Amino acid sequence: MDADFLTWVFLGGGLLLMILELAIPGGVAFFLGISGIIVGVLRFLDLITSTGGSVAAWLILSVGLTIAIRPFIKKYLRPESSFKYADEDYEAMDQVAEVIEEVNEYDNSGKIRFDGTSWRAKSLDGTIKPGAKVRIRYRENITWIVEAEGVKEPSKEQLKNLSRN
């Protein structure tokens, strides 16, 4: 391989890797590119002449720069980041959903539509008919426990109590 061509490969490849860092951030491609440019300059100045020496110098420089300098760069040039707890149950509490299959307090055979998906649901008290709006209170396993948003039908037990009075 021609010595001048190899020098341009290191210089061009280094520059390409540094530009590639813009598309794939992380710092590693940038250090590989810097190493390539340094080796290209050393070859241009005839300080490194062999192909094997050039590759070895590039590998050593790349590893050295990545290990030595990357922690400092990450410390002082932090990207913008945010942290948020992803607690879906907490975010769903007190949200309004629509009943799509009758919901009762005895089993989890009812269904609601919440966030574009149908979910199993159980009522806190009474039966809630399809089309009614409910407010989500909490979740037991994969079943949402809901409460009617407005007027709800009394449960069988409440009806018995009313008939006794």
Image: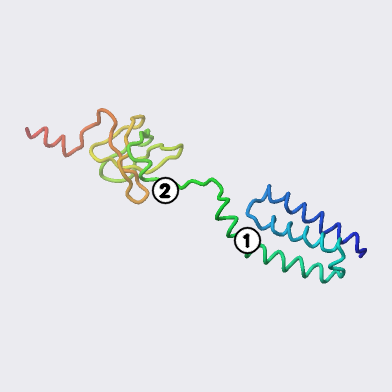
Residue at label 2?
A: 85
Determine which quarter of the picture holds residue 13: bottom right
| Alpha carbon distance from label 2 to label 1 | 32 Å
Amino acid residing under circle 1: Ile
Up the image or down, 131 lies above or below 91; here it is above
Question: Where's residue 104, x and y in %?
Answer: 28, 40
Total number of numbered discs in the rendering? 2
Image quarter hosting the N terminus: bottom right
Residue drawn where x is 32% and y is 49% of the image: 140
Determine which quarter of the picture holds residue 28: bottom right
Residue most extreme to the top? 151
Residue most extreme to the left? 165
Amino acid residing under circle 2: Tyr
Residue 34 relative to residue 154: left or right: right
Image quarter hosting the C terminus: top left
Residue at label 1?
A: 69
